[in-house]
Image: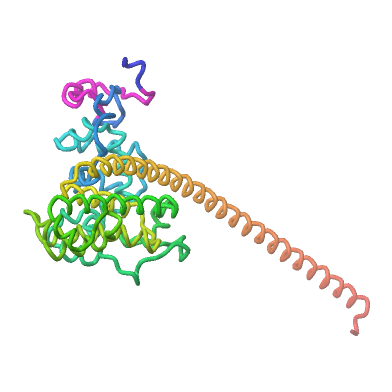
């Protein structure tokens, strides 16, 4: 692609940007002038950006955690261009950032940062801890207990849907995004399919490692045993314990068990929760050593993650446009309010003048009458 094919943008006119080209342009990406922060030239993003796996929000968080440029704009609902400038500043001194741009392209990095910003992950330690519990090992055990399924706290469809509480981020989803949770029809189909796949994976594991027990129990097919029964079995006989800690395995099994709970009880789950359940399902079948079912869940997870990322991006765009329009309406409302006050002032002032004039006319008439009849 030639420079004439590059996306149109305001170009830097500073001579200093030319001198920085060899330093900042070595990755073959856009060169940003440190003075005016405009682009000097736009080059093709790496060819492997489209071919790379789905970007990890965890990697993006680690790469940009503590970025002063990002923190400064975090609470201002920044545009993609402002986020991009913060990325470019971070890129200069962080190899991890350069790797992300090289592997996925800056547009994907910016979109992922926007999702994390909207969820207050960079500005709220509790939000980051809930999103990435493995990055806070000292809190992992308590977080695992807090995140386990609690029927009294779950919200089924039809109850306060417009202000569904987001347990991941401690605020109503209505506040941070328009798209709160997965619609009931695809959610029910997805969770039911996941439950069926996991039950077959468990049965395949049982046939390989405990066939005699299966025969003794009369478990002749995958449909004979619900997922929760397998989970209880694995918790009791410790058949899946590896080098992973017992707490981590317990958390994983509890997460997998939620899939059946959601499918049976039609519980609501937010988009972040869907991603986590898919990740848990993939990790679970990998632990079972069932490559057939792992090869089924892995692409399913990636495609749904991409769909959720696109949906989140669209929801953020809609929210921004909605906020902009509401701001315009509010500004117009203030303008009309001022005009209303001006009209009322005009009305009151002129009525007062009319009253004063009428008072003068009356007193003048009274004075004239008194002159005519001086004894009164």
**The image quarter in which residue 261 lies:** bottom left
Q: How is the image coloured?
A: rainbow
Asked if residue 20 is positioned above or below residue 321 in the image, the reply reads: above
Q: Main secondary structure of the magenta part?
A: loop
Q: Is residue 32 magenta?
A: yes
x 31%, y 34%: residue = 107
**The image quarter in which residue 60 lies:** top left
**The image quarter in which residue 264 lies:** bottom left
Between 356 and 123, the one nearer to me in the picture: 123
Residue 21: x and y, percent?
A: 20, 22
* Residue reaching furthest to the left: 243
* Residue reaching furthest to the right: 372
* Residue reaching furthest to the bottom: 375
x 19%, y 27%: residue = 24
Between 373 and 266, the one nearer to me in the picture: 266
Between 264 and 375, the one nearer to me in the picture: 264
How many numbered markers are drawn?
Answer: 0
In the picture, measured across the screen, residue 267 lies left or right of residue 26, that is: right
Residues rendered magenta in the picture: 7-33
Asked if residue 54 is positioned above or below residue 252 in the image, the reply reads: above
Image quadrant occupied by the C terminus? bottom right
Residue 66: x and y, percent?
A: 19, 48
Image quadrant occupied by the N terminus? top left
Residue 146: x and y, percent?
A: 24, 66
x 32%, y 16%: residue = 3
Residue 304: x and y, percent?
A: 34, 43
Q: Is residue 241 magenta?
A: no
């Amino acid at each position: 692609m030639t420079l004439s094919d590059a996306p149109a943008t305001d170009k830097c006119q500073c001579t200093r940007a030319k001198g920085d080209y060899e330093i900042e342009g070595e990755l073959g990406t856009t060169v940003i002038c440190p003075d005016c922060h405009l682009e000097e030239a736009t080059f093709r993003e790496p060819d492997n950006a489209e071919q790379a796996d789905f970007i990890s929000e965890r990697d993006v968080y680690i790469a940009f955690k503590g970025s002063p440029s990002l923190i400064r704009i975090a609470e201002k609902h920044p545009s993609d261009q402002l986020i991009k400038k913060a990325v470019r500043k971070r890129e200069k001194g962080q190899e991890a950032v350069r790797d992300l741009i090289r592997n996925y392209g800056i547009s994907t990095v910016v979109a992922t940062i926007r999702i994390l910003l909207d969820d207050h992950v960079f500005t709220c330690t509790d939000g980051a801890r809930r999103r990435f519990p493995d990055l806070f090992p000292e809190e992992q055990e308590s977080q695992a207990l807090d995140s386990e399924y609690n029927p009294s706290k779950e919200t089924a469809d039809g109850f306060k849907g417009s202000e569904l509480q987001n347990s991941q981020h401690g605020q109503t989803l209505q506040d941070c995004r328009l798209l709160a949770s997965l619609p009931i029809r695809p959610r029910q189909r997805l969770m039911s399919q996941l439950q069926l796949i996991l039950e077959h994976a468990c049965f395949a594991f049982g046939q390989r490692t405990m066939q005699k027990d299966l025969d003794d129990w009369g478990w002749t097919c995958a449909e004979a045993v619900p997922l929760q029964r397998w989970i209880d079995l694995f918790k009791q006989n410790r058949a899946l314990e590896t080098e992973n800690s017992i707490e981590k395995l317990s958390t994983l099994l509890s997460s997998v068990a939620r899939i059946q709970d959601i499918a049976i009880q039609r519980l609501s789950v937010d988009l972040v929760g869907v991603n986590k359940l898919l990740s848990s399902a993939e990790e679970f079948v990998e632990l079972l050593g069932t490559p057939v079912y792992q090869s089924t869940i892995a692409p399913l997870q990636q495609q749904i993650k991409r769909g959720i990322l696109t949906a989140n991006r669209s929801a953020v765009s809609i929210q921004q446009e909605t906020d902009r329009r509401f701001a315009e309406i509010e500004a117009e409302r203030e303008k009309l309010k001022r005009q209303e006050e001006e009209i009322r002032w005009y009305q009151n002032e002129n009525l007062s003048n009319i009253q004063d004039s009428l008072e003068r006319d009356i007193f003048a008439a009274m004075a004239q009458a008194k002159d005519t009849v001086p004894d009164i």
